[in-house]
Amino acid sequence: MQKSDFSFHLPEELIAQTPLPVRSASRLLVCHRNSLATEDRQFSDISSFLKAGDLLVFNNTRVIPARLYGKKDTGGRVEILLEKILDDKRFVAMLRCSKTPQIGQKILIADDQAVSYEGRKGGFFQFRYEEGGLHQLFIEHGRMPLPPYIQRMADEQDEDRYQTIFARKPGAVAAPTASLHFDEAILQGLQQKGINTAEITLHVGAGTFQPVRVDDLSQHIMHAETYDLSEETVEKILQTKATGGRVFAAGTTSLRALEAASEEGELKPMSGDTRLFITPGYRFRVVDGLITNFHLSESTLLMLVSAFAGVEEIRHIYRHAIDEKYRFFSYGDAMIILPE
């Protein structure tokens, strides 16, 4: 398929710039795999579409303050968005500045803190921090890495609202946004109904915001993301399947990790990096249903949900969402894609 097959026009005013006052106050568009039927509901109704014995899998990654602002030793301003920490001293990142630094050039992050530029590494830029303690550098001087389509600086509310309530394992530079809608009241309601939960970890990288630069999707090289699927979660999934329950992924990150761990045909505990690129025609092995936000035009995430629900179906669903003025992207509304 072609990248242009996943293009749509979104009015700018539908891009959510701030979170709603209450996490679960967002809207919920209900749809089914391979169906054009839709229903407009509230996210607080989510348990109505799940059954006792179903399993909902969350991503427990935690967003780190991954955006650094600094300046070159020549005075030019620089913005660094962490992609991945490689070891105690080195990391790769996306870079925004007027001119790429010279190799060896220092970027001043604070009065007494600097990183040095080491050159390109794939589609990213590599830096070195000689003082060590890279995690501490980002904790002390980093800002919450809001996506590029949010046209404001991160503030205090984002420190809380751009994290899920079950964020435990630091490493992501973008939130698993479908799970931002869940609060304690929602989780309690799920538990009371007999709906089970489990967790995986997939650290969302800055590559998730990189555009697809080729029209022929077979030529696209997917960015790598680190994930971990435990034996406990695998056992819960297999037990759910054995007793006739359905497995729902809370977000495309959960889905990607689960499907990556079953690429060899059998689901098993796994950890490492995945470059799994899910496009229409992919055969899903683990996930029966999906809760997700609305995604960018021509993005790999839109391609994933199109593979899951159907290309024409997602086009119809997105047209409906735009017509009904749903809020889009990270702080926007959600949809649930139910099994056929």
Image (spheres, rainbow, N blue to C red):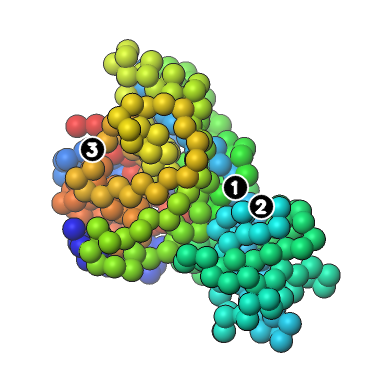
Taking the view exactly as shown, the residue that stands out farthest to the right is 112
Q: Residues within 10 Å of mark 3 (few under 14, many from 20)?
A: few
Amino acid carrying mark 1 in the image: Gly
Left or right: residue 313 versus residue 182 is left
> Which quarter of the figure is the C terminus placed in?
top left
Question: Which of the numbered marks, if any, corresponds to residue 87?
Answer: 2
Amino acid carrying mark 3 in the image: Arg
**Can residue 55 be spotted in the picture?**
no
> Which quarter of the figure is the N terminus placed in?
bottom left
Residue 231 location (% of width, % of height): 49, 23
- Mark closer to the observer (2, 3): 2
For the residues marked 1 and 3, what is the alpha-carbon distance in whole angstroms?
29 Å
**Can residue 217 be spotted in the picture?**
yes
Question: Which of the numbered marks, if any, corresponds to residue 283?
Answer: 3
- State yes or no: discs 2 and 1 in contact (Cβ < 8 Å): no
As drawn, 261 above or below 274: above
Residue drawn at (34%, 64%), measured in percent from left and top? 212
How many numbered badges does the structure rendering display? Answer: 3
Q: Secondary structure at mark 2?
A: loop
Which sits in the foreground, 156 or 340? 340
As drawn, 266 above or below 143: above
Residue 54 location (% of width, % of height): 36, 22
Classify residue 52 by image quadrant: top left
Amino acid carrying mark 2 in the image: Asp
For the residues marked 2 and 3, what is the alpha-carbon distance in whole angstroms?
36 Å
Classify residue 235 by image quadrant: top left
Residue 81 location (% of width, % of height): 58, 64
Residue 271 location (% of width, % of height): 50, 36
Question: Which of the numbered marks, if any, corresponds to residue 171?
Answer: 1
Q: Secondary structure at mark 3?
A: loop
Q: Residues within 10 Å of mark 1 (few under 14, many from 20)?
A: many
